[in-house]
């Protein structure tokens, strides 16, 4: 708006000036070197103006001829750089997307167009790695070591490449180079930690773990758990090497770090037993039972006086241990199992049935079933076997990463290589559901109709009417007893008086059909 006003003003002023000059023509005479020009002032002004405009045009022409090639070159270089950067971006995107062919193509183009060698090397190395060309990748990563600013990136690339090729020693050497330049480099410490875990070098792994925590790459809780796992492995190694005192110190450290981990307590007891210190081992189990009750600890405890001791003694020792924490499911289970072996059937049944519904798994139901069988209570036995089939499976040393069940606790899962993923736990609910499926299907197709004498049973799914004996998962682990009647026939007419109240309360458990009451 302002510009328009200004323009209008300029035009008005110029027209006024033109009009004024036209009104006052005057004369101008030029007399020079024998030439003489007579003209008016207005014409002289117009000629001068035209001459100035012509001069300006000529100047611009000359300037563009002189500087033209240089600015042309500059524009060309800029276009090249833009194309190079575009290729670099596309190359990095291709690496991220895992497209090896595109990555290499873009990498070559970027290198041709760009002057930035380290950057081009980085993309080329990643593309080569993606295309599984370790020679080229090594050459590129190595060349990056020459530049101060890309040296660490080069070391990291070489370390990762070495790990992928299974050369732990080279990977650790590269990581240590990086640590020498910048202590506390996270990827380098993690590389050392992982390689040493793979090698079973627990001491070195623990040193790397401590450094990770010192440089704040791990929070205290994570570090505590991992350290406990390493201490357990170190205790085992020391114990196997006959260094019993060192082993005991390591085991104690593990318990101090993670008192809730049964594997720590078990290791300590195993170390004591290996050192021949049985009374100490017993004391340790008693000390750890409340925090880390575990069937293996219970078994060790009842066996500690030697296998020749009779079943009654074992049952008594189990009761002594259970006294420390009588309400724990593992306490009750230990009492129930040892009492069953000793033929103290009432205690066995009572202890098994006292385990709360939420804590029950197939082990408790099996003890109840075997105790009922031994007492000749076939109906209760059949119902308990049925519940054993429906209950969640017994816990084990399960890897949370790959789902492998291990014979004993390991710091590194030997199936998937994950660290600290094996723990004492029940298999996942999904696995339980799968295990149950055939039983439920069998009930739907071949279930016996409930007897009409029991009015309540017709309106509810009667668990006792299932002929699941052949399809239940637990059947193989049952003692083969020829005197035991067929559960399907024995359970056909459950008299209300036979059903024990504590087990009937089990109905709310998901997937468990309510027992007829
Ligand atoms: Zn695993």
Image (cartoon, rainbow, N blue to C red):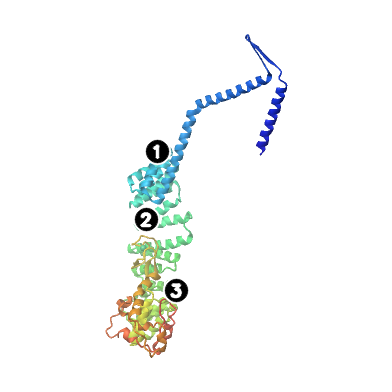
Q: Quadrant of residue 468?
A: bottom left
Compared across the picture, whether 154 is left or right of 471 comes to right
The mark that comes first in sequence, 1 or 2, is: 1
Which residue is at the far bottom? 453
Q: Quadrant of residue 306?
A: bottom left
Identify the residue position indicated by label 1 in the image: 112
Q: Quadrant of residue 388?
A: bottom left
| Residue 243 seen | no
Query: Can you say whether 160 is above or below 11 in the image?
Result: below
Which quadrant of the rendered structure holds the N terminus?
Answer: top right
Q: Which one is nearer the viewer's eye here, 456 or 51?
A: 51
Q: Residues within 10 Å of mark 3 (few under 14, many from 20)?
A: many
Which one is in front in this view, the residue at disc 3 or the one at disc 1?
A: 1
Identify the residue position indicated by label 2 in the image: 196
Question: Regarding mark 2 in the picture, which secondary structure is present there?
Answer: helix
Q: Give residue 290's mark.
A: 3
């Amino acid at each position: 708006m302002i510009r328009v006003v200004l323009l209008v003003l300029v035009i008005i002023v110029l027209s006024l000036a033109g009009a004024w000059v036209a009104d006052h023509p005057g004369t101008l005479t030029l007399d020079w070197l024998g030439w003489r020009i007579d003209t008016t002032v207005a014409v002289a002004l117009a000629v001068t103006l035209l001459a100035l405009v012509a001069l300006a045009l000529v100047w611009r022409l000359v300037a563009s001829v002189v500087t033209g090639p240089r600015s042309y070159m500059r524009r060309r270089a800029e276009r090249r750089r833009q194309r190079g950067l575009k290729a670099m971006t596309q190359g990095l995107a291709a690496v991220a997307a895992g497209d090896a062919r595109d990555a290499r193509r873009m990498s070559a183009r970027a290198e041709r167009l760009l002057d930035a060698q380290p950057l081009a090397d980085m993309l080329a190395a990643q593309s080569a790695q993606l295309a599984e060309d370790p020679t080229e990748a090594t050459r590129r990563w190595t060349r990056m070591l020459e530049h101060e600013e890309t040296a660490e990136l080069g070391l990291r690339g070489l370390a990762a490449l070495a790990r992928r090729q299974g050369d732990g020693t080279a990977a650790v050497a590269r990581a240590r180079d990086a640590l020498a330049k910048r202590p506390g480099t996270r990827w380098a410490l993690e590389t050392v930690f992982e390689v040493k875990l793979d090698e079973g070098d627990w001491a070195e792994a623990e040193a790397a773990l401590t450094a990770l925590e010192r440089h704040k790459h791990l929070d205290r809780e994570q570090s505590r758990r991992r350290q406990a796992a390493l201490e357990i492995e170190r205790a085992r190694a020391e114990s196997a090497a006959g260094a019993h005192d060192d082993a005991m110190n390591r085991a104690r450290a593990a318990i101090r770090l993670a008192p809730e981990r049964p594997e720590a307590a078990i290791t300590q007891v195993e170390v004591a037993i290996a050192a021949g210190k049985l009374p100490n081992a017993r004391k340790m189990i008693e000390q750890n039972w409340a925090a880390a009750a575990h069937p293996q600890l219970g078994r060790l405890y009842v066996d500690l006086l030697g296998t020749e001791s009779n079943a009654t003694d074992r049952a008594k020792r189990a009761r002594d241990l259970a006294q420390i924490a009588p309400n724990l499911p593992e306490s009750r289970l230990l009492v129930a199992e040892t009492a069953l072996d000793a033929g103290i059937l009432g205690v066995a049944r009572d202890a098994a049935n006292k385990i709360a519904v939420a804590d029950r798994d197939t082990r408790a139901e099996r003890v109840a079933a075997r105790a009922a069988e031994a007492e000749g209570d076939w109906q209760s036995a059949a119902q308990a076997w049925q519940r054993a089939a429906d209950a969640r499976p017994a816990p084990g040393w399960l890897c949370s990463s790959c789902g492998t069940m291990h014979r004993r606790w390991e710091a590194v899962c030997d199936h998937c290589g994950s660290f600290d993923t094996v723990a004492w736990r029940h298999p996942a609910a999904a696995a339980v559901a799968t295990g149950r499926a055939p039983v439920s299907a069998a009930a739907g197709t071949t279930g016996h109709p409930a007897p009409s004498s029991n009015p309540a049973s017709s309106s509810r799914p009667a668990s006792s009417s299932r002929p699941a004996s052949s399809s239940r998962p637990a059947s193989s682990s049952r003692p083969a007893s020829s005197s035991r009647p067929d559960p399907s026939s024995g359970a056909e007419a459950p008299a209300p008086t036979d059903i024990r109240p504590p087990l009937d309360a089990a109905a709310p458990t998901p997937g468990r059909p309510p027992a007829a009451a």
